Amino acid sequence: MWGNRKDRVGAFLDDGSEIEGKYTCAGTVLLDAKLRGEIMAEDTLVIGDHGVVEATVRAVILVIRGRVVGNVTASE
């Protein structure tokens, strides 16, 4: 999963971070934070073990390890 350049994490939101509002991202993003609102990922979004998302989530590729409450749409 993390072997080639395309799959490398481009952004990392760590445990302890909190975001409220609309978050739009491109590339591979690892979210281990709290997010409330809306998130739109143009590529891969990984919600880590500590991730807590209360939002509308749209992503091309979505991996959920944490907690998500809300509408979720992923195309792969």
Image: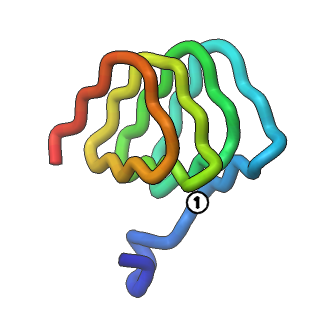
Which residue is farthest left?
76
What residue appears at the point 61 percent right and 18 percent down from the top-left corner? Answer: 36
Q: Is residue 58 left or right of residue 34?
A: left
Question: Quick check: 75 above or below 32?
Answer: above
Say which amino acid is labelled 1.
Gly
Residue that label 1 marks: 10
What residue appears at the point 48 percent right and 18 percent down from the top-left corner? Answer: 55
Which residue is farthest bottom?
3
Image spot of residue 6 (x, y percent): 39, 70
Q: Camera-side residue: 52 or 26?
A: 52
> Which quarter of the rendered picture does the N terminus lie within?
bottom left
Image spot of residue 23 (x, y percent): 58, 26
Q: Is residue 13 left or right of residue 6?
A: right
Question: Quick check: 56 above or below 63?
Answer: above
What residue appears at the point 56 percent right and 54 percent down from the top-left corner? Answer: 49
Image spot of residue 69 (x, y percent): 44, 22
Image spot of residue 56 (x, y percent): 41, 17
What residue appears at the point 80 percent right and 38 percent down from the top-left corner? Answer: 17
Name the colouring of the figure.
rainbow
Question: Quick check: 53 above or below 21?
Answer: below
